[in-house]
Amino acid sequence: MATRASSGRRARGPQQPPPAQEERLYEPLEPAAGAGGGGEAARAEAAGRAVGAEPLGEDRALDLALRPRSFAEFIGQSRVVENLALYVEAARRRSRRGGGRRAPLDHVLLSGEPGLGKTTLAHLLAREIGAGLRATSGPAIERPGDLAGVLTNLEYGEVLFIDEIHRLPPAVEEYLYSAMEDFEIDIVLDQGPAARTIKIDLKPFTLVGATTREGLLSAPLRSRFGVLEKLEPYPPDDLERIALRAAGLIGVPLEPAAARLIAERARGSPRVANRFVRRLADVAEVRGRGAITRSIAEQGLGMLGVDEAGLDAMDRKILGVLCRHGGGPLGLKTIAVAVGETEGTIEEVYEPYLIRRGLLVKTPRGRCATAAAFSHLGFKAPRERQPPLPLAGL
Ligand SMILES: Nc1ncnc2c1ncn2[C@@H]1O[C@H](COP(=O)(O)OP(=O)(O)OP(=O)(O)O)[C@@H](O)[C@H]1O
Ligand SMILES: [Mg+2]
């Protein structure tokens, strides 16, 4: 049923060499070569990896293996899931009234930090409406012709999943407007005076877009989605259930106290919780008796460099750079160079959690470490610290 149309994320470009630093818990969003610079070349190359990058290798296999297969299996985000289930049901009823022909669902935009379940929900939506899903991603669609190819291959009522939709090139995005609105697309043939356009009718479809950066989406594109749902970081109670579910699927006993510890340190993300379970299962295998006990979890998370606040080595590096510069403000580029990570990854993977924990603030002049960051790292806060507040009144 489900097919992958163009697997832009991994199909293009060589895989990035593994980073030299300690084991990574979170995937970089852009190749290491682009560190600090971003830039077109890095972006283009990043298309193979891509923003909000799905994990590679073993982690990707884990992601797939643990992906919930129905709304009922999907833990947490109850408001979002209830809404989506209602729209699916409404579409079903419309289909029944319309003589059985499947009524396509409205276009859906899912936003939220990496690893919160956007791809999972896109697949669930297709499954629940009984339609096929074709997946591609913003950076993979380079030219309008690529988009036309994808769109004209869609069957009636199918779901087209565009991951990282905020990274669609503007020229492509404009073509998507008429496709979304009127299920037709104008193709320009030839160039210069001989140029002419032909209109191609498309079969009605549902576009599901996913983005880690909703703010970067253009207003015209955003307004063409009938359903906009934002996924929020998961509370520890949900993450505890997610960890227990993952342990069950992997087949490793997980003590409730250990599940709690994992949940508290998983920075609101099911992907991180699942990854911890997988790694701790290895620790339990070698250092324990196969079960993830509280003490195995503590030991294992320590080995992964995850502290009691859920920060890993890179989080602490970022805060460390800021603290050593009097708490900031420092520009994102400076931080990226100092810690050897890409700007995109810092902004999308690390910062949201540091901000949520009250350890870092963004100001118009740059990033600042808070007093809590100084005390977390065991640094003495400078006496004459500028309050890291937005510059009101300027
Ligand atoms: N609600 C959930 N219940 C259980 N497991 C979940 C849930 N949400 C996500 N997961 C797990 O977390 C993994 C990551 O989810 P997913 O790939 O859907 O995230 P994403 O939002 O698409 O991330 P990215 O922005 O990096 O593409 C999934 O493979 C699944 O195993
Ligand atoms: Mg995804």
Image: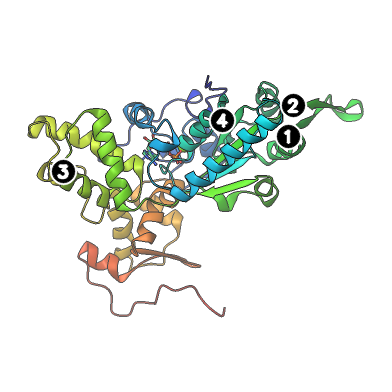
Q: Position of residue 179 (x, y in %)?
A: 73, 34
Q: In front: 329, or 118?
A: 118
Q: Mark 1 touching mark 2, by CB under 8 A?
A: yes
Circle 2 residues within 10 Å: few <14, some 14–19, many ≥20? some
Q: Residue at x 15, y 38 (%)?
A: 292
Residue 69 point in image, percent of width and height: 42, 30
Mark 2 residue element: loop
Is label 1 in a helix, a strand or a loop?
helix
Which tag, 3 or 1, sits closer to the chain's start? 1
Residue for point 19% across, 31% down: 252
Q: Residue type at mark 3: give it.
A: Ala
| Residue carrying label 4 | 129
The kind of secondary structure element at disc 3 is helix
> Which residue is situated farthest in the right direction here?
193
Q: How far apart are labels 3 and 4 at the CA level?
A: 40 Å
Mark seen at residue 179: 1
Quadrant position of ligand 1 = top left
Q: CA distance from mark 1 to mark 2?
A: 7 Å
Disc 3 and disc 4 in contact, CB within 8 angstroms: no
Q: Which residue is mark 3?
A: 297
On the image, the x and y values in percent for residue 391 come to 51, 75
Among the two numbered marks 3 and 2 on one chain, the one whose residue lies closer to the N terminus: 2
